[in-house]
Amino acid sequence: MRLGDLIDSGLILYETAEDSRQAVSALAALLQKQGCVTSAEAFCEAVARHEAEAASELSPQIAVPHATSDTVLRPSIAVGRTKDRRTVFLIASDNADNHIRSLSALAGALLEDGNTEKIFEET
């Protein structure tokens, strides 16, 4: 699974969210609008349950909230930013296999310098 299979321009939120929680909510709504999840609210609940078990912060600048849920129709990653310039990658997976593949694709891309900025510049 390639990162390009998971993110497209319709899954990038160009409006700045107040904080990471608001970003997750807005990104989940975007996932629903793009036909990736059936319910933004139910997916947010799944993400909140996962976050209660393990925080998703990779660094002060990058958060990767994620969940596997029955509401997911298509494995996807939605991307947004907060006011304090934190980039939030919201990963939606329909099963454990796709969950691991999505995390791997994102991790590989993040290891390359400047890729986070490129997402916002090139789309």
Image: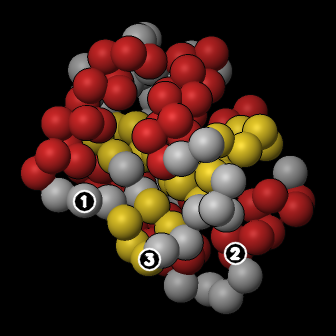
First in sequence: mark 2 vs mark 1:
1
Q: How many marks?
A: 3
Assign a secondary structure to mark 2. helix
Horizontal arrangement in the rendering, residue 81 relative to residue 31 (left or right): right
Where residue 92 appears, x then y in whole percent? 40, 38
First in sequence: mark 2 vs mark 3:
3
Q: Quadrant of residue 68 in the image?
A: top left
Horizontal arrangement in the rendering, residue 50 relative to residue 30 (left or right): left
| Mark 2 Cα shell of 10 Å, populated few (<14), some (14-19), many (≥20) | few
Q: Amino acid at mark 3?
A: Ser
Residue 115 at least partly seen: yes
- The answer to whether 98 is drawn above or below residue 60 in the figure is above
For image coordinates 38% across by 15% down, the residue present is 41
Assign a secondary structure to mark 3. strand
Horizontal arrangement in the rendering, residue 71 relative to residue 10 (left or right): left
Q: Is label 2 or label 1 in front?
A: 1
For image coordinates 29% across by 37% down, the residue present is 47
Residue placed under numbered mark 2 in the picture: 115
For image coordinates 76% across by 70% down, the residue present is 117
Assign a secondary structure to mark 1. loop
Q: CA distance from mark 2 to mark 3?
A: 15 Å
Q: Residue furthest left?
A: 53
Q: CA distance from mark 2 to mark 1?
A: 22 Å
**Of 25 and 108, the residue lying toward us:** 25
Residue placed under numbered mark 1 in the picture: 55
- Indicate which disc residue 59 carries: 3
Residue 9 at least partly seen: no
Tell whether label 3 touches label 2 (CB within 8 Å). Answer: no
